[in-house]
Image (cartoon, rainbow, N blue to C red):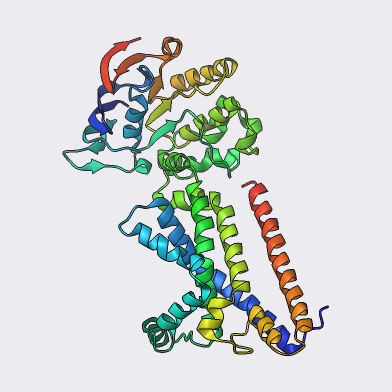
Amino acid sequence: MFDLTPAELEALHLSVKVGLVSMLASLPVGFALAYLLARRDFPGKSLVNGVVLLPLVLPPVVTGLILLMLFGSQGPLGKFFEQTFGITFAFRWTGAALAAAVMGLPLMVRAMRLSIEAVDKRLEFASRTLGAKRWWTFVTITLPLSLPGIMAGAILSFAKSFGEFGATITFVSNIPGETQTLPIAIYSILQTPGGDGPAWRLALVSVVVSMIAIVGAEWVERRIRTKPA
Amino acid sequence: MSFDIDISAKRGAFEIAATFRADPGITVLFGPSGAGKTSILDFIAGILTPTRGRIAVDGQVLFDSTARVNLPPERRRVGYIFQDARLFPHLSVRANLLYGYNLTPPGTRYAEPAHIVEVLGIAHLLKRAPLFLSGGEQQRVAIGRAILASPRLLLMDEPLASLDEARKLEILPYIERLRDELKIPILYVTHLASEVERLADVVVEVAAGRVTGQRRA
């Protein structure tokens, strides 16, 4: 309906892919961090909390630079992932997904942490006295009761990932078909003379995708809330 | 079945010491608010850990500081009915009732769902969500849920406290009927003399964290 050119379609496709992959990859990490921060006391807790929240406060360019230093082809973690798992981040869409995940993590962890903290511990005690082991209590009580927050965290992470610009372009540059996501494509078009027309079209596309994500999330959340078990 | 406790503990600046015995029937822990009655129940359930002492049900040790025994709550088979019903809000009444039942090995079950549901008069509530029950109904479901886990000892922490007068009168006969049917000790915490009078077989008096007396009612 928007009559997108193949290049524009590619940028849209890439943005959705980066958003979904970074959200899915962040889920286990984000939930584990949120659970630890909500329910456990350990040395260095405030440091962990600080590191997780840092990308929210830092200029995205700085986050991108740090990623370049750590996960670039010469970076220690970059080498490690290349040699151990065969995953390259530098100048690849995987790198865009990594940057998006790091930028989305603070939002995800925060939403999840709040919802885990809101689960009444006394319900967990009740479950234990009824014969449930710690992990079963977690699976049948804590997890389902914090599900709305987990959903919210996932949506926020996707939303952030879908629109991430600064850290992504710093870390993996602007390569059409590989790292040129929707916002970066819009930026590139704006750099060419007479580009503001096509730029508006792409901007409209982002609005539509974002709206679909938000409405879809609300729908899923309402289903979770009203579903009797 | 019988129950033995002899423990001491620190809760902040508060010292708790409890030594008593309970047989099948209702043993009321009676004392003013803040005397440490609920903490004693939490020690028995395994939610809190005493500093030293011993807790045993029917000869099985739940906690023993010298022998370094401290069973987790799920292995104690101690039922706990709280002041607030604490039903799981995301589960139906039926799923709440069966939560502990399903976790109990068939060989150790003595309570059957159909019978308990009938005794407590909650058959018409099974499909509902806990949120839509009255306080009295919630408490009846909570009682059923605890009993269906077939506990060897039942703890009741002011189960009527959050109910109005009419609801209390609605619940009391159920508690009496369970006392007569179940052959297990029931520890019942209250600060109301009226409940002592109506329910107690034995009264254990608690004041300022200590058991100060024990008598037959």
Q: Is residue A156 left or right of residue A121?
A: right
Residue B206 in which image quadrant: top left
Q: Quadrant of residue B168?
A: top right
Q: Is residue A197 left or right of residue A113?
A: right
The one of A131 and A70 positioned closer to us in this rendering:
A70
Residue A4 lies, with reference to residue A36, above or below; the image says below
| Residue sitting nearer the eye, A133 or A211 | A211
Residue A25 appears in the rendering: no
Residue B151 x/y as whole percent: 40, 34
The quadrant of the image that shows the N terminus of chain A is bottom right
A4 up-or-down from A27: above or below: below
Seen at 44% across and 85% down, the residue is A72
| Quarter holding residue A173 | bottom right
Compared to residue A88, the image places residue A139 above or below, namely above
**Residue B194 coordinates in the image, percent (x, y):** 45, 10
Q: Is residue B4 visible?
A: yes
* Residue placed furthest toward the left: B66
Report whether B105 appears left or right of B18: right
- Taking the spot 54% from the left edge, 68% from the top edge, the residue there is A104
Along the viewing direction, whichever of B129 and A192 lies nearer the viewer: A192
Vertical placement of residue A72 versus A145, above or below: below
Q: How many marks?
A: 0
Task: Please state the horizontal and vertical placement of residue A197, each as a whole percent of the image.
Answer: 79, 82
Q: Residue furthest front?
A: A193
Residue occupying image coordinates x 61% and y 29%: B122
How far from the left and from the top, in percent, is residue B176?
A: 48, 18
